[in-house]
Amino acid sequence: MLILGIDTSGRQGSVALLRADSRLEAPAECELLELVSLEGGQYSELLVPTLAGLLERHGELRSALGLIAVASGPGSFTGLRIATATVKGLAEAFATPVVAVSVLEAVALGGLVEGKVVAALDAQRSEVFSGEYLVDRDQPDPARMIREAITSFEGFTAALSECDANEVFTPDDSIATRLRDISINSRTLHRPNAEAYARIAYRKFRAGVRADVATLDANYLRRSDAEIFKAPKPGITPA
């Protein structure tokens, strides 16, 4: 099975092509064929040509893809929309299964610990994207989401005091530093790339998880600026 991984959730993105033997019992048995970096801010121009070149270099057709994995967010509005539109086009054209993976879930799994895990991402504007997961690597789908949210940093730390997670995982130094300054244990991880999302998606796929391509959308958590500014102010009735 050929697996295509796509990540355009952050400032730097990537695409990956992996091959897995679906007959094997161990779902982690995936061979990375190639990982290609994408420059953030140029996803609309680069994503489709990069995917085409990746398949061509390995002598594969788009119809040969057995699974498409996509980082669903939270993250860049523009990047996530481009990835979602591209995945829908590929999946609908060739009836290819899709698995969407939350960026927060990938961060939580990247900590390589079990039990209650908290993942955090810098949401800008002094806000934090956070996800609380129960990780059990013996399960076919190893991360069970308890909740995901966007809050102020103060709201995030207040919520931490109410859960029994021992450590916060984040790819953002700014969050890790602020947490350590108030004596909250945190660990900085590398941000997940397309290979990581493909491996997670394959395991979820083996556990029976599929995305509905018709309703596939990004996991924004926060509304876009266009939606925020379009919304009427309290007490004002739209004309």
Image (cartoon, rainbow, N blue to C red):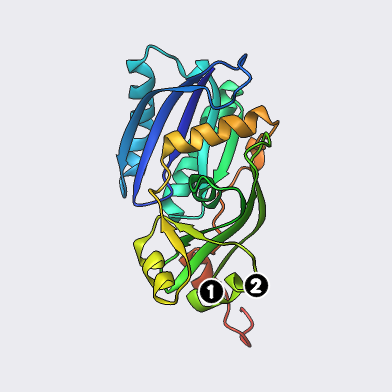
**Residue at 45 percent of width and 15 percent of height:** 61
Q: Position of residue 210 (x, y in %)?
A: 66, 34
- Mark count: 2
Of residues 70 and 200, which is closer to you in this image? 200
Examine the rendered structure and indicate whether residue 220 appears above or below residue 206: below
Examine the rendered structure and indicate whether residue 161 appears above or below residue 196: below
Q: Which residue is mark 1?
A: 157
Q: CA distance from mark 2 to mark 1?
A: 9 Å
**Residue at 66 percent of width and 38 percent of height:** 141
Q: Position of residue 65 (x, y in %)?
A: 52, 20
Kindly give the residue lying farthest to the right in the view shown: 208
Please state which amino acid type lies under the numbered disc 1: Thr
Of residues 180 and 207, which is closer to you in this image? 180
Left or right relative to 114: residue 56: left
Disc 2 crowd rating (10 Å Cα; few below 14, some 14-19, many 20+) is few
Examine the rendered structure and indicate whether residue 148 appears above or below residue 32: below
- Check the picture and name the quadrant holding the C terminus: bottom right
Disc 1 crowd rating (10 Å Cα; few below 14, some 14-19, many 20+) is some
Q: Which residue is mark 2?
A: 162
Q: Position of residue 101 (x, y in %)?
A: 56, 43
- Check the picture and name the quadrant holding the N terminus: top right
Lower position in the chain sequence, tag 2 or tag 1: 1
SS label for mark 1: helix
Please state which amino acid type lies under the numbered disc 2: Glu
Q: Position of residue 40 (x, y in %)?
A: 32, 48
Residue 39, by quadrant, is top left
SS label for mark 2: loop
Left or right relative to 151: residue 11: left
Kindly give the residue lying farthest to the top in the view shown: 59
**Residue at 61 percent of width and 28 percent of height:** 97
**Residue at 47 percent of width and 28 percent of height:** 4
